[in-house]
Image (tube, rainbow, N blue to C red):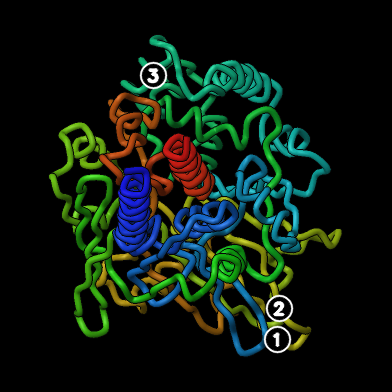
């Protein structure tokens, strides 16, 4: 009897071990990877970098033939590198921590710029932002601006927890333009300077965004302004270095995510190879979509997105960018170098030129390359495929003549870079990045997470913050599952 009992117990235990081994094997084969990431821009790469540090497996699928998204750096025959996308990282951007962690060398800027408003050029040659503003405004204008800026500071303090109270939420129902010009009735020159300064950041008219979001955008200029940083070898270096750290073998370029499907305990992601149109479905524990706002309409979700998430996406607006590199003759530094040898670039221009970034060249015989970041209605116009580059060149030549007479004759050539018209996210009057719809979009849809700048802000800081938000949530869920 005892022998039979132990024999039965032995085979029962053996069966249990085999069964458990089988379950483990099924569990491991059930997923192609832990996390599938759609998009290899800064948001997708940051997500992968953070997951990789925790030993979580992932695959990245990128629709284009490169990594980096809107961070692009052009290279020219003379060895010059000029930004053709993301121009700078502001001091409060969590990307700065990544840049330091990856030991990427940076250059530092003062944040404020010279400006060309109402056909007048105001040169930044002073030692501080305050002195510069005093050179633009008279005493009454300067004091009016300081009073307004102090009120913005109080409101920004309330926004630190990213949960504005009911009174602040009312500011989403008026435009930033009306809030500045009608509620505060600032002097015209002060209002114009605020307008030109903020419109560069939002890529659209200040009349097109809610006051609450204009206030949040103003944090980079509030209370004396933030510093801005540029990576020495080009801003796209951050994306390239992140890609190396996460492993290029985990990144599939020219692969378009066409469908997300929530299933029990997993998510299925259908991907199309853009070279041969081959479709393949992958299964993972989680999926992170960093697909930009303008491409989300091209993706299918199963089940379909809930109404709140659909409304959050459909009711957002956008800003536009267009970049031009202008090659000036070697003897043209007189336009941007003043009598004391100070460089007055960059210039915020209330014109088709947008922001005129610093002119660089390899040596004294090489042409200067001036970088134009064109925004808003001019960017939308220039992004239109039916507009010839020759027409754009003629319009920019006229705009240069208004700032520096005779300068257009010194231009050797232009190089143009078109963006999709919906380059960056914006929140129109009636919407806000803090409202209920935005909050809902930041919550997962089953096992699918939405990341990317449009879930947080209008810039690369939103791309990084969204990645940190999503990864932290996934890590918490994984830890909970382990326990």
In the rendering, at what x and y percent does residue 450 appear?
34, 45
The one nearer the camera, 419 or 114, is 419
The one nearer the camera, 93 or 9, is 9
Tell me if label 1 and label 2 are in contact, CB under 8 Å. Answer: yes
Rendered residue at 72%/71% (across/down)? 333
Q: Secondary structure at mark 2?
A: loop
In the rendering, at what x and y percent does residue 366 appear?
70, 86
Marks 1 and 2, Cα distance to the nearest angstrom? 6 Å
Precedes in sequence: disc 3 or disc 1: 3
Location of residue 282 with respect to 411 vertically, above or below: above
Precedes in sequence: disc 1 or disc 2: 2
Indicate which label's residue lies in the foreground, 3 or 1: 3
Residue at the front extreme of this rendering? 1
The N terminus sits in image quarter = top left
Location of residue 251 with respect to 289 vertically, above or below: below
Indicate which label's residue lies in the foreground, 2 or 3: 3
In the rendering, at what x and y percent does residue 211 appear?
41, 26
Marks 3 and 1, Cα distance to the nearest angstrom? 51 Å
Rendered residue at 21%/45% (across/down)? 264
Q: Which residue is mark 3?
A: 171
Location of residue 481 with respect to 210 vertically, above or below: below
Precedes in sequence: disc 2 or disc 3: 3
Tell me if label 2 and label 3 are in contact, CB under 8 Å. Answer: no
Quarter of image, res 232 = bottom right
Marks 2 and 3, Cα distance to the nearest angstrom? 46 Å
Q: Which residue is mark 2?
A: 361
Query: Is residue 98 found left or right of 384 in the rendered image?
Result: right
Query: Is residue 358 found left or right of 30 in the rendered image?
Result: right
Residue at the right extreme of this rendering? 340
Residue 366 bears which disc, if any? 1
Is residue 286 visible in the rendered image? The answer is no
Q: Residues within 10 Å of mark 2 (few under 14, many from 20)?
A: some
């Amino acid at each position: 009897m005892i022998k039979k009992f132990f024999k039965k117990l032995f085979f029962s235990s053996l069966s249990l071990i085999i069964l458990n081994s089988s379950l483990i094997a099924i569990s491991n084969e059930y997923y192609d990877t832990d996390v599938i990431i759609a998009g290899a821009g800064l948001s997708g790469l940051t997500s992968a970098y953070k997951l990789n540090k925790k030993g979580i497996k992932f695959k990245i699928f990128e629709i284009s033939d490169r990594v980096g998204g809107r961070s692009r750096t052009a290279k020219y025959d003379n060895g010059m590198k000029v930004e053709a996308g993301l121009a700078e990282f502001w001091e409060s951007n969590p990307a700065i921590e990544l840049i330091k962690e990856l030991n990427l060398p940076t250059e530092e800027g003062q944040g404020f710029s010279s400006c060309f408003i109402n056909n007048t050029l105001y040169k930044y040659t002073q030692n501080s932002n305050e002195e510069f503003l005093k050179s633009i405004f008279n005493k009454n204008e300067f004091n009016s601006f300081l009073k307004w800026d102090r009120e913005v500071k109080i409101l920004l303090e309330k926004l630190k927890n990213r949960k504005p109270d009911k009174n602040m939420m009312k500011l989403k129902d008026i435009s930033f333009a009306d809030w500045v010009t009608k509620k505060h009735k600032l002097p015209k020159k002060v209002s114009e300077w605020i307008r030109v300064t903020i419109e560069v950041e939002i890529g659209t008219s200040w009349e097109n965004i809610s006051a609450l979001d204009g206030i949040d955008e103003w944090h980079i200029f509030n209370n004396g302004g933030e510093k801005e940083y540029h990576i020495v070898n080009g801003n796209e270096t951050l994306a390239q270095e992140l890609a190396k750290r996460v492993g290029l073998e985990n990144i599939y370029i020219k692969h378009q995510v066409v469908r997300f499907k929530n299933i029990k305990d997993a998510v299925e992601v259908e991907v199309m190879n853009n070279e041969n149109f081959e479709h393949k479905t992958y299964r993972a524990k989680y999926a992170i979509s960093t697909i930009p706002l303008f491409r989300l309409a091209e993706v299918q979700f199963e089940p379909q997105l809930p109404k709140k998430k659909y409304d959050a996406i459909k009711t957002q607006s956008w800003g536009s960018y267009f970049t031009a590199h202008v090659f000036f003759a070697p003897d043209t530094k007189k336009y941007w170098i003043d009598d004391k040898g100070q460089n007055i670039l960059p210039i915020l221009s209330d014109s088709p030129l947008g922001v005129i970034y610093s002119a660089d060249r390899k040596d004294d015989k090489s042409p200067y390359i001036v970088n134009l970041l064109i925004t808003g209605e001019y960017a939308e116009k220039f992004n239109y495929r039916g507009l010839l580059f020759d027409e754009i060149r003629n319009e920019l030549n006229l705009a240069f003549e208004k700032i520096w007479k005779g300068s257009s004759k010194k231009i050797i050539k232009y190089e143009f870079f078109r963006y999709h018209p919906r380059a960056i996210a914006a929140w129109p009057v009636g919407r806000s990045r803090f409202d209920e719809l935005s909050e809902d979009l930041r919550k997962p849809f089953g096992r699918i997470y939405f990341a990317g700048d449009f879930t947080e802000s209008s810039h690369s800081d939103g791309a990084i913050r969204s990645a940190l938000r999503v990864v932290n949530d996934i890590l918490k869920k994984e830890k909970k599952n382990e326990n």
